[in-house]
Amino acid sequence: MEEANTRNGPLHADVAVIGGGVIGLGIAGEARRSGRSVALIDPAPASGATFAAAGMLAPVSELHYQEEDLLELMLESSALWPGFERNVTGSSAGRGTGYRTTPTLAVGADAADRRALADLRDVQLAHGLVVESVPLREAREREPLLSPQISCAFDIPGDHQVDPRRLSAAILAALANHQPGDSSWIAGAEDGFAVHDTAAGLLWEDGRVVGTVLGSGANVLATETVVANGLDAARLNGLPDGLSLPLRPVYGDILRLRVPEHLQPLVTATVRGMVRGVPVYIVPRDDGTVVIGATQREDGLSASGGGANPVSAGGVYQLLRDAQVLVPAVAELELLEATARARPGTPDNAPLLGRVEGREGTVPGLIVASGFFRHGVLLTPAAAKICVGLMDGTVDPRWNKFRPDRFSRPLSAARASTGGPSADTPHPLPKDHA
């Protein structure tokens, strides 16, 4: 393994991807498949929101009121998932990523939950989605450990799942699968692609972004730079003047539990429930564990975390309580892990995805892919396809509604006219516009 070494001058890549969460990894993998060399810049890839994510690929269940604009993108990405997964693992079995196409079962605990799920089903059907009512007896035949007290069940064949931790490991392994001398190999990067450092800011030359300066002060020079580092995107130095990336942290508590041998499988497919109006889900893993999640909070505990990821005691209690209402045997499981991570939300809960438009035209060399909130894992194939398409000069007008500059005032021409700081400057730190 070659250790990262930036002391002998800048690293050179076709693409610099800032951020090693699932979105950044997906973009990096697709860019590599397109024949480009890729530098992945992250001190600890897949350790943020991706580490905690349950991995539900749920365009139907995740249709929320007043978020209908996202539906087309979610359905597009869902359709891309089988091919994306095959490209990552080289097979169609899903064994390397925990990818499963078993339908999701949505259940309600009481009469009010039944009405709420029925109302949501009406909205889903109105958008052409498939949600089928399932007799309670049939639901319990499919999932014998479901509580006999549930009030309703719906089959959602279009909602699937993947294991984000295994997916991330598979993409990292694929990125490392090359040799010195290959056109994809970046001299000075670990395994020819990995840069275990933070990105401090963007580098500019003659009005275009030409890479990034690292926290260590070294440079990574690239034809295309993709900002995919979640909440940290808004804190990068050297963003185009006037560009606003209004990202906010939304924390979620999530639990991982081991299922004793005599209870396996606890459930055979993802169970999404509504318990007294509060959503909860149970997601099975191939290793005999289940994931239970996830709370959603923007509270004082989150704000006082000081950069940490505090787990809410009330959130853990709520998840275990509600999961037991749906599957009483949850009480007999072994609690392995309670995790909290911040997901990057935007004012409209839709991603910031695409190029940035300034008064002098599109800012060359810069692509933003952040703000995926609850949908990062689901939207990874679509984000990767869109970003690599932009690198190829292809613009799909369907996704203009998610432009990263949609919350910004008209961008200043100053950056384009002055060219910003030069990539030839040893350690440029542009003005902070975060």
Image (tube, rainbow, N blue to C red):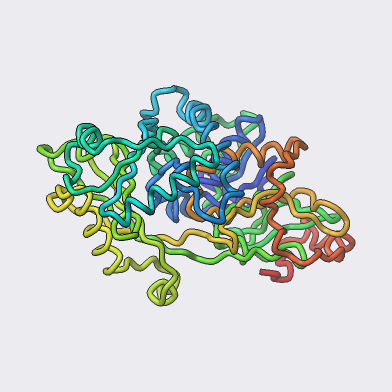
Residue 307 x %, y %: 45, 70
Q: Is residue 137 left or right of residue 125?
A: left
Residue 182 x %, y %: 62, 28
Residue 44 x %, y %: 46, 53
Q: Residue at x 70, y 59 (%)?
A: 202
284 relative to 251, above or below:
above
Q: Residue at x 54, y 53 (%)?
A: 372
Q: Residue at x 82, y 58 (%)?
A: 358
Q: Is residue 230 left or right of residue 271?
A: right
187 relative to 433, above or below:
above
Residue 388 in which image quadrant = top right
Residue 143 in which image quadrant = top left
Closer to the camera in the image, 298 or 361: 298
Closer to the camera in the image, 176 or 387: 387
Q: Residue at x 79, y 55 (%)?
A: 357
Closer to the camera in the image, 407 or 209: 407
